[in-house]
Image: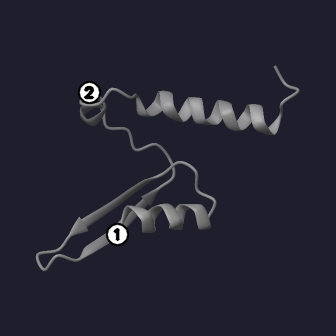
Amino acid sequence: MVAQYLEFTRRHGIEVAGIENIRTADGRVLTYGVNTNTNYNSDVEQRTAKSGPREIVRHLARVLKETYPEAR
């Protein structure tokens, strides 16, 4: 499923997203949301070593440097 989501985001030019799904009683996985804006959850962030907002800023800074290398 993750590989399919990655292919979907690649195909549509989505670089940062949260994808929501649910597993049905019979085992099917149904996708019900693709969020390309912030969907911050502080409880989740407290359980991981990485900060979601910090990683987004790092990603956007890399894109900015690659797009405008002459800018400082």
Q: Which residue ends up furthest to the front in the rendered image?
A: 3
**Image height of 24 relative to 54, above or below:** below
Viewport quadrant of the C terminus: top right
- Label 2 vs label 1: CA separation? 25 Å
Which residue position holds label 1?
31
Q: Where is residue 49 in the image (x, y as percent from the top left)?
A: 33, 26
Q: How crowded is mark 2: few (under 14 residues within 10 Å), some or many (20 or more)?
A: few
Q: How crowded is mark 1: few (under 14 residues within 10 Å), some or many (20 or more)?
A: few
Q: Residue at point 13% right, 80% down? A: 26
Q: Position of residue 17 (x, y in %)?
A: 48, 51
Q: Residue at point 61% right, 65% down? A: 12
**SS for callout 1:** strand
Give left or right: position of 31 versus 15: left
**Image height of 64 relative to 12, above or below:** above
Which residue position holds label 2?
46
Q: Position of residue 30 (x, y in %)?
A: 29, 73
User: Mark 1 is on which residue type?
Assistant: Thr
**Image height of 6 relative to 42, above or below:** below
Q: Residue at point 84% right, 25% down? A: 71
Q: Which residue ends up furthest to the bottom in the rendered image?
A: 26
Give left or right: position of 9 versus 23: right
Q: Which residue ends up furthest to the left in the rendered image?
A: 25
User: Mark 2 is on which residue type?
Assistant: Gln
**SS for callout 2:** helix
Viewport quadrant of the N terminus: bottom left
Earlier sequence position, callout 2 versus callout 1: 1
Give left or right: position of 35 versus 62: left
